[in-house]
Image: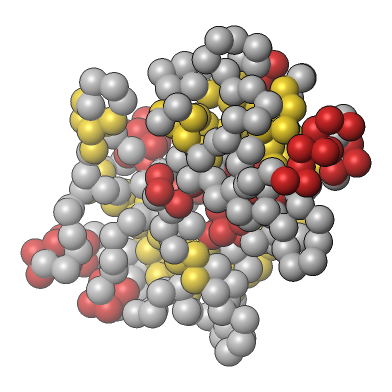
Amino acid sequence: MRVIFAGTPTFASIALNALFDRAFDVVAVYTQPDRPAGRGMKLSASPVKLAALARGVPVLQPASLKAADAQAELAALRPDLLIVAAYGLILPQAVLDIPRLDCLNIHASLLPRWRGAAPIQRALLAGDAETGVCIMQMEAGLDTGPVLLERRLTISHDETAGTLHDRLAALGAEAIVEVATRLRAGEAVPAQPQPGEGATYASKIGPEDAMIDWTQDARQIERAIRAFDPVPGAWTLWQSKKLKLWRASASMPQNLTVSAARALEDARPGQVLACDQRLWVACGQVGSAEKSVLAISEIQRPGGKRIPAVAWLGAAQAPKAGDCLG
């Protein structure tokens, strides 16, 4: 069975390596063109390209698959199966029609929930209790195709986008190998249409999305910090500069000292209540609930590294009780 793989980031490279390890005949790999990266902004190959080159597999990097010559080049490879994972380019219907057997996508959510570009972050932001991966037949719609295989996992209370990404990438690799193995053996793998209800869209995450809104409840802010770890990193403003927040937990007002609890009564969202081992910040409230509190334990100043908040608090440029972030 001749396989073409299309993908770009680490999530996709893990699936590609799993196919290599199971001796699938990957005849070519498609990935996005090399992009500038790092402080020197040098052109860098994608993780998928590096994985393919390490196995001696040809790599193709068209800027688009809409052109007739790009489609003809793909068709000349005579694929039986096209496997796509976080490729980042739109596949026209003419491309989806090329493989003899099927065009399959590895998607990191329980479809139809979180169709789109950022399902991992959106699941964390929403406070979902579980997520998973789906192996889906590709069609013209955005992640709307029938599902061949679904695998679920529970989201832990301290999950970050980074840890969840790694778990889902491994799960997706296992799932695509299972489906491809059955297809290679000539077995039919039935596909179930997605439910008509419950669809949500996971729009792409940008740096502006990661700015902390202190009027939100502390539990939502805690989820945002975990959802944006490691990229792009949740941030707020302190002295007109970005301060990144990497680890924090929503706390009950009764956990505050007496003086901090009194300050909370009249505090504005973003106001620092206390500085000890952590940075205690007043947040918004939901409905008639009490004002909420966020206890920040890990930060990153501009140009610096991630450090425990206690290593910074007490310094001349650090916030003090009564100061306001944001």
Q: Position of residue 4 (x, y in %)?
A: 35, 57
Left or right of 100? Residue 119 is: right
Q: Up-down: is 206 above or below 95?
A: above
- Total labels drawn: 0
Q: Position of residue 31 (x, y in %)?
A: 29, 48
- Residue depicted at x 89% and y 32%: 258
The quarter of the image holding the N terminus is bottom left
Left or right of 23? Residue 268 is: right
Q: Residue furthest left?
A: 69
- Residue depicted at x 72% and y 33%: 273
Q: Is residue 298 visible?
A: yes
Q: Quadrant of residue 122?
A: bottom right
Left or right of 40? Residue 10 is: right
**Colour approach in the figure:** secondary structure
Q: Position of residue 120 (x, y in %)?
A: 57, 54
Q: Is residue 183 visible?
A: no
Q: Up-down: is 172 above or below 311?
A: below
Q: Up-down: is 229 above or below 27?
A: above
Q: Residue furthest bottom?
A: 196
- Residue depicted at x 61% and y 41%: 270
Q: Quadrant of residue 264?
A: top right
Left or right of 85? Residue 295 is: right
Q: Up-down: is 321 above or below 144?
A: above
Q: Nearer the viewer, residue 255 or 116?
A: 255
Q: Position of residue 196 (x, y in %)?
A: 58, 89
Q: Nearer the viewer, residue 325 or 172?
A: 325
- Residue depicted at x 56% and y 79%: 199
Q: Nearer the viewer, residue 150 or 246?
A: 246
